[in-house]
Image: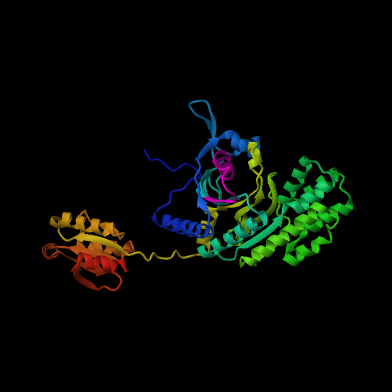
Amino acid sequence: MEFNKPRGTRDFLFEDMEERKYVENTIRSVVENYGFKEVKTPIFEDLELFTTKSGEGIKEEIYHFQDKGGRDLALRPELTASVSRLYNNNLQKAAKPLKMYYFGSCFRYERPQAGRFRQFWQFGIEVIGGTPVYNEAEIIAMANEALTKVGIKNYEVAIGHLGIIKGVLNHLNVTPEDTTRIIASIDKEDYELLEKILDECSISQEYKEIINKIISVNGTRSDLESLKDVVKDIEDSYEAVCQLSETLEVIEAFGFEDYNVKLSIARGLDYYTGIVFEIYVPDLGAEKQITGGGTYNLTALFDSEEVESTGFAFGFDRIMEAYHRQNIETPTSDSQKVLVVPVKKDFKIDAIKVAQTLRANNIITDIDLKGKKLKKNLSYANNNNINNVIMIGQSEVEENNVTLKDMDSGEQVTISLSEAIEKLSN
């Protein structure tokens, strides 16, 4: 009987994993350089964690089940809620800000299509507490640096602030339910629906024009500044424009200026409170968004102390798709790799001892224990990017030496094992 992988999942082979590990480790290196530390949460959580965050409708989109004890559980569809739960359980009294990152697989039950799978990976970061303006600037600059170091090209960073549009709606005493509907229509860029909802809410033509001027901003920091006159009599909106302007100034201090102010970014989730941003790779077509985030208050879900968080999550699979579409080459490792070859089966034990000594000196070492011919072993080394071959035969065992062949230059020398280790370690 032949078994196939479940629908919406993938197998990753050697080359796939080399690329994925390179991209993962590059991003890890950047975020750790900014002082972030890794956390891990369970792959499954209480179902209520996700229904509380996203509503009962989320059940149609996720894998959920009852365990043998009758508990309602779900495979995590994303990691933000899990990290907020982790904070609530373990870190409420820890010194702020808390800077953490996570990487792991998530699961959604949806129709598989290009760029969307039922098992996928997220690489995200969270800053809990601290000063939002500086947190926001730092993580946006950090996201830009991570993508640059991975080698992704032609991406766009769009930054907005939900407080600007929410300030207008609060000023007009629009209900929370209608505010959610309005934000959602802006998020979907469904402007016919937006017009319909504004009419239902009896929004005057004057304020419709103000709303349209806000969501039409799609340009530079100076375009944002020009909005101050439009919202000068709406206190919350004016304050939000000033806060966004301050954040952009700090982002530029981090050395990043190639962003776009886009106030139609709405991220239609109630818990977002301030800055929102998204990053797109147009080469990916309809699935061009590779990350989204901002400032939000999820801890309120747990009746715990109210504290703002700023964060984002990279869609890791979409980054990999961009990586492939842009034909980015994975750099070859500088680490020396060695294949130890006993030229006859009589020398396998000696070869094992040599291999273990190399490994004890942190040299990546493979060994032929099958007894292949030397020519096949050299071909194996070439095909697997192994830089060096060490051959063990009668004379090497008798004289306590090894024969070291450099596969790049073809140079071959017979030297002591300690000399070989020194040569391979440089």
Q: Quadrant of residue 279?
A: bottom right
Q: Vertically, is 182 above or below 304?
A: below
Residue 399, percent from left and from top: 12, 65
Q: Vertically, is 256 above or below 356?
A: below
Camera sees residue 189: no
Q: Vertically, is 36 above or below 150?
A: above
In depth, the one of 103 and 34 nearer the eye is 34
For the point 77% across and 49% down, the residue is 166
Task: Say left or right for 255 vs 42.
Answer: right
| Total numbered circles | 0
Q: Vertically, is 319 above or below 53?
A: below
Residue 423, percent from left and from top: 27, 69
In depth, the one of 322 and 300 nearer the eye is 300
Residue positioned most to the top:
69
Residue 256, percent from left and from top: 62, 66
In the rendered image, residue 382 lying in the magenta stretch gets the answer no
Task: Say left or right for 420 vs 272.
Answer: left
Task: Say left or right for 201 vs 185.
Answer: right
Which stretch did the figure color magenta?
A: 77-101
Image quarter where the C terminus lies is bottom left
In the rendered image, residue 83 lying in the magenta stretch gets the answer yes
Image quarter where the N terminus lies is top left
Camera sees residue 247: yes
Residue 404, percent from left and from top: 22, 68
